[in-house]
Amino acid sequence: MTLAPTVVEPRLPEARGPVSMAVLELLTERAPRNHLHRIDVSLHDSDPYGVDIQLALYVCYELHYRGFTGVDPGWEWNPGLLHLRAQLEEMFLTAVQRDVGDIGPEDTADAEMAKLTVEPAGGTGPSYFLRSKGTWEQMQEYFVHRSLYHLKEGDPHAWAIPRLTGLAKAAFVAIEFDEFGGGRSDHVHQQLFADLMVAAGLDASYLGYIDAVPTESLAVVNLMSLFGLHRAYRGAAIGHFASTEITSSPGSRRLVDAMERMGAPDTCARFYREHVEADAVHEQVVRTDVVGDLVSREPALDRDVVFGIRAHLMVEDRLADHLMRCWTSGRSSLRRPLSS
Ligand SMILES: [Fe+2]
Ligand SMILES: [Fe+2]
């Protein structure tokens, strides 16, 4: 079997407004080594969920993952750029906290995770739509939106590893070990998704579709990078991780059903089939051994776990609303439709 090739360093995306333009122009220069260089960009009147802010933040975070071809790796720890990134993060986080709302004293991580396991009767949203009446082209669009995350699946949460101890750490790494293929490169979930993209006739390159997706898809990944890169948000990072693992299995089942109905290539269904099975197990491990152990060790993190779960659901809902708005009105959900 030939594995889809994966590019190590992606190309820089196109600017989508003045803030992302300022960041992208800066990255074409060599990072200053010996002095603090303040970057003056006006963030007033910018929408925290808007594509300009989300793309600028995405590019800043990407310097911690694979960087970009032709970009000086020194930018990763440049104080001027980090200062700008901190302002973008503040805007984003303030909006997320506002939209998540208050977390009451009776809201516990345990209760929140239990709620996630209850599938609503008559559920709506992209996976239900794709299962019942979506087209293959809409399925391909879904892959494109998800490619930003799945081609780096496991990476954003891996930042949490040094921030855990004991059983929470051991169990978390056990789940991540599966995400990273259990020692087999052809089983790495990032690779399974690259294979899916090729089988679907799409570009499997890392960040290959960053210019094509809407802001909602960028925010989904930015949230996990934000939580992962800040020790202060380790509870939220674990909550986010738990939420992805617990909701993955039933959602993946619907997508497998959708692909079977569409007669999609088996390599596409394989990625989701793998998640139906693996995440049913991961769900149990994450609830008891990761979150259970973490909050018994650090009870103050219980609310942060709840926040991470709700923040995950909130940004996912924003993306789901975008997809459903576009699909139900017969429009492409991408900035650049696949058929054009
Ligand atoms: Fe996975
Ligand atoms: Fe998983």
Image (cartoon, grey):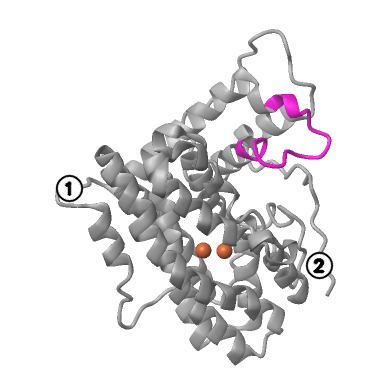
Query: In 3D space, how far apart are the residues under numbered discs 1 and 2 (Cα atoms)?
Result: 48 Å
Depth check: 75 or 108 in front? 108
Please rate how many residues cluster around mark 2, counting C-alpha atoms within 10 Å: few if below 14, some from 14 to 19, many from 20: few
The region drawn magenta spans 61-75
Q: Is residue 143 left or right of residue 87?
A: right
Depth check: 70 or 268 in front? 268
The image shows residue 71, relative to residue 108, as above or below, that is above
Q: Position of residue 286 (x, y in %)?
A: 40, 58
What residue lies at 46% left-to-right and 41% top-to-bottom?
A: 227
**Residue bearing mark 2:** 3
Residue type at the position of mark 2:
Leu
What residue lies at 50% left-to-right and 32% top-to-bottom?
A: 88
Residue type at the position of mark 1:
Gly
The image shows residue 26, relative to residue 219, as above or below, that is above
Query: Residue 117's quadrant in the figure?
Result: bottom left
Task: Please tell me the numbered disc located at residue 104.
Answer: 1
Looking at the rendering, in which quadrant would you find the C terminus?
A: bottom right
Number of callouts: 2
Depth check: 189 or 174 in front? 174
Mark 1 / mark 2, whichever is N-terminal: 2
What residue lies at 46% left-to-right and 65% top-to-bottom?
A: 282
Q: Position of residue 258 (x, y in %)?
A: 55, 85
Q: Position of residue 45 (x, y in %)?
A: 46, 33
